[in-house]
């Protein structure tokens, strides 16, 4: 059951589906319903498209295109390794993690991410039935939770969600639409009542957005951020929403200390980050101390929202390829090293600023033009720090 003006939304969706999609609305894939029932259809579809493109380009490349051909060959070979891994009767999760660390091909993420999170089972024969069962389970949770309408909800939790959802990704068309916002409200509320120790905490809304955009991408032929979700059929919307809920739940299970009363996980991570930065960039740490800048003043948000307020969702999605490859602990453990490398990246500029300049700079970092390249450099730097310091517990005050 949808909270709000449900009849109007149903009418709007019906009108949108009966109309011919405009170019700026986005386009549903012709085989979208097949993907709902069998996620492996993503692979079959893309393989046919790539083979067709390869035949069309055969013999057309000029000698000056050698670099382009080499890069295309590398991407094709890399994708082939992913496909061979995830189409086995029983996926080798160690191999998949190794492949995913360096990034997952965009079209394969809707299949790879659930495998890495353990939402999809590794044995191929059980995947479709498991997916159908989990989606039915989520639909049942939604129906039960909202059976009594708005009056039957925890008003404090619902009020905060109603405030936060419209603030999610401001200015991005996907997240400004009523259909998308209703999906996010249901995801957040159902999660909150299933986790009474924490309930809903601001910032969790941000963490749902990469999952939603990745899963939506499996069904459309356009940029998810510009897509009109009123075009989705009920079965596709339900699938995207349910998959987002279960994968978000698995992520949050690994960092729940960040969201229980007092948020001790975040306080612990910020303290450890300050100690780590003092080791890897002593002059920066000394300057921050001299200017009376406390790590809690900027790093709390970095931990609470996993840097999502500092970088784009596309940057976040690439970063999460590596986090998911490391395992769900990476969202607390490895993330600490990413945040430290992220701060040290700006060390020279920060050491030239006073307190006010530092705080203002860190609240609006110049990352708007970042691509996968910058994220991969950041991850590489973080991995060096992780390899050096993770087992040296003394630099964290002797414990976790």
Image (cartoon, rainbow, N blue to C red):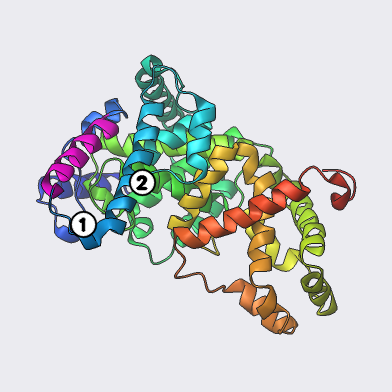
- Magenta range is 41-58
Residue drawn at (17%, 50%) of the image: 16
Q: Is residue 66 left or right of residue 169?
A: left
Q: Residue at x 59, y 39 (%)?
A: 326
Q: Is residue 318 left or right of residue 127?
A: right
- Expressed as whole percent of the image width and height from the top left, the position of residue 181 reads 39, 51
Q: Nearer the viewer, residue 122 or 158?
A: 122
> Residue 193 in the image: x percent, y percent?
58, 36
Residue 188 sits inside the magenta stretch: no
Label 2 neighbour load within 10 Å: few <14, some 14-19, many 20+ = few
* Residue 190 visible in image: no
Judge whether residue 241 can be spotted in this image. yes
Q: Is residue 373 above or below residue 201?
A: below
Q: Which residue is mark 2?
A: 74
First in sequence: mark 1 or mark 2? 1
- Residue 188, image x and y in percent? 51, 44
Q: In this figure, which residue is indicated by the disc labeled 1?
A: 25
Spatial CA distance of label 1 from label 2 is 33 Å
Identify which residue is drawn at 14% across, 46% down. Answer: 58
Q: Position of residue 95 (x, y in %)?
A: 50, 30
**Which label sits on residue 147?**
none
Name the secondary structure under disc 1.
Answer: helix
Q: Residue furthest front?
A: 63
């Amino acid at each position: 059951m949808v909270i709000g003006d449900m009849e109007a939304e149903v009418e709007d969706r019906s009108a949108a589906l009966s109309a011919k999609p405009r170019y700026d609305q986005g386009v549903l894939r012709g085989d979208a319903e097949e993907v709902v029932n069998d996620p492996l259809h993503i692979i079959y579809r893309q393989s046919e498209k790539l083979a067709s493109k390869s035949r069309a380009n055969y013999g057309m490349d000029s000698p000056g295109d050698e670099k382009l051909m080499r890069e295309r060959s590398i991407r094709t070979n890399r994708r082939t390794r992913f496909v061979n891994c995830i189409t086995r009767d029983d996926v080798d999760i160690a191999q998949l993690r190794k492949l995913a660390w360096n990034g997952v091909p965009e079209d394969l993420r809707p299949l790879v991410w659930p495998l890495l999170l353990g939402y999809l089972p590794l044995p191929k024969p059980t995947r479709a039935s498991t997916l159908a069962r989990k989606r039915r389970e989520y639909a049942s949770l939604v129906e039960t939770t909202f059976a009594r309408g708005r009056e039957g909800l925890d008003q404090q939790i619902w009020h905060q969600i109603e405030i936060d959802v419209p603030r999610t990704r401001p200015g991005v068309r996907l997240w400004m639409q009523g259909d998308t916002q209703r999906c996010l409200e249901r995801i957040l509320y159902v999660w909150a009542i299933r986790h009474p120790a924490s309930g809903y905490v601001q910032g969790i809304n941000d963490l749902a957005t990469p999952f939603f955009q990745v899963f939506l991408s499996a069904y459309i032929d356009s940029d998810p951020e510009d897509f009109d979700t009123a075009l989705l059929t009920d079965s596709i919307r339900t699938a995207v929403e349910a998959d987002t809920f279960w994968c978000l739940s698995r992520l949050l299970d690994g960092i729940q200390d960040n969201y229980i009363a007092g948020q001790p996980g975040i306080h612990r991570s910020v303290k450890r980050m300050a100690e780590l930065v003092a080791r890897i960039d002593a002059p920066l740490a000394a300057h921050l101390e001299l200017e009376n800048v406390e790590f809690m003043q900027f790093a709390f948000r970095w931990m609470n929202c996993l840097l999502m307020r500092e970088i784009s969702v596309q940057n976040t999605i690439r970063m999460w390829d590596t986090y998911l490859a490391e395992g769900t602990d990476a969202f607390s453990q490895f993330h600490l090293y990413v945040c430290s490398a992220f701060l040290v990246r700006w060390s020279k500029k920060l050491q030239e600023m006073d307190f006010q300049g530092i705080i203002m700079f860190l609240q609006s970092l110049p990352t708007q033009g970042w691509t996968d390249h910058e994220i991969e450099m950041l991850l590489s730097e973080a991995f060096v720090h992780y390899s050096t310091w993770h087992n040296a517990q003394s630099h964290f005050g002797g414990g976790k």
